[in-house]
Structure formats: C-alpha cells, structure tokens
Image (tube, rainbow, N blue to C red):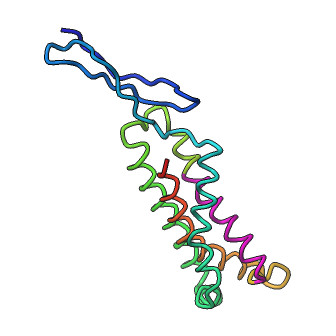
Amino acid sequence: MENQKTFTKRIGGYLHKMIPITDASGKLINYIAKPLMVEFKPRDIMQVVIGSTILALPVTYTEEAWNLGNELPLLNVGLLSLLSLVFIALFVYFNFYRFNIKGNLFNYGKRVIATYLISVLVVGILLTIIQRCPWQTDYLLAIKRIIIVAFPASMSATISDVIK
C-alpha cells in the first residue's frame, strides 16, 4: 500500500493543490487539482476593482453617506476603517489561507491590504468625480467620506475576489 501525499503544482500559471485519489488497496488512481488562491495576481486586482465598484456606486450617490462624513467623529471613522480591515482579513483567511497560511503569510497580508487600498482608491475616484470630496477646502472631510463609503465597497470587493 502506497502512502500518497498532496503537493503543490503550477498549472496554467496558477498554483494548485494536487490531491491523490487511491483505490481501496491504496494504489494511486489519479489526482484532483484544486486551485490554491494564495497568490494575488492582476486578475484578482481587477476583480477587486469591479467588486468594490459594485457597492461603491450606489453608496457614493447617497446624501446620507456624505452627511455621515460631516457628523461622525474621526475616531468613529477610524474604527470603521479598522473594522473593514478585520472583516477583510477574516474573510480572506477563512476562504483562501486557512489551510495554507504556512509559507503564505506575506501573500495573505498583501491581499488584505491591497483589497482595502484598492477599494479606498475606487471610492476616492468616484467621490472626486461627482465632486463630493472637497480636497482643497476640507481634505479631512474628503478622507472621512471615502472611508465611510469604502466600508461596503471593500466588503463587495472581498466577495468578488472569491469568484474564479
């Protein structure tokens, strides 16, 4: 009886976990290739951009979001930003890295930070285009509005990154 182990193999430029399939006697029949989504590639970046836009667009156009930027204290906005990062980190960990964190800690951190920063960038561009980021007169209000809208945008960006 042979003892087959899983291993990692690059197929078509992407990492896959090769899982052995054996018969009752332990003889290797074949392998199942399961994609390992531990690398953050250009395709993933585009998915995050599109995903963040999905929820950024409707929220960007709401006056309630603009007013929250005026009303919420900076501490609350900072906590909202931190909460976004925690949610992204947890979702990414449990969907991509739970069983593959060893050796991929840098990629994990890169994916979490990149997802949030891309979402913030998309929201910033959208709010600037519709003239709701007063960069010259009140840059702090602009940043607060971006962070507030980036919360739902980063959640949809994270979800869209799972789709392959």
| x 19%, y 14%: residue | 26
Percent position of residue 16, x then y: 45, 30
Residue that extends furthest to the left in the rendered view of this protein: 24
- Asked if residue 108 is positioned above or below residue 57 in the image, the reply reads above
Nearest the viewer among 8 and 88 is: 8
| x 54%, y 32%: residue | 14
Percent position of residue 3, x then y: 24, 13
- Asked if residue 49 is positioned above or below residue 128 in the image, the reply reads above
Residue that extends furthest to the top in the rendered view of this protein: 1
| x 62%, y 53%: residue | 114
Percent position of residue 148, x then y: 59, 77
Question: Residue 146 appears in which quarter of the rendering?
Answer: bottom right
Q: Main secondary structure of the magenta part?
A: helix
Number of dots carrying numbers: 0
Magenta extent = 112-131
Which of the image's four quarters has the N terminus?
Answer: top left
Nearest the viewer among 102 and 23 is: 23
Question: Residue 133 appears in which quarter of the rendering?
Answer: bottom right
Q: Is residue 120 magenta?
A: yes
The reply, left or right, for residue 45 in relation to residue 29 is: right
- Asked if residue 129 is positioned above or below residue 26 in the image, the reply reads below
Residue that extends furthest to the front in the rendered view of this protein: 29
Question: Residue 134 appears in which quarter of the rendering?
Answer: bottom right
Q: Is residue 123 magenta?
A: yes
Percent position of residue 92, x then y: 46, 51
- Asked if residue 124 is positioned above or below residue 103 in the image, the reply reads below
| x 59%, y 56%: residue | 48
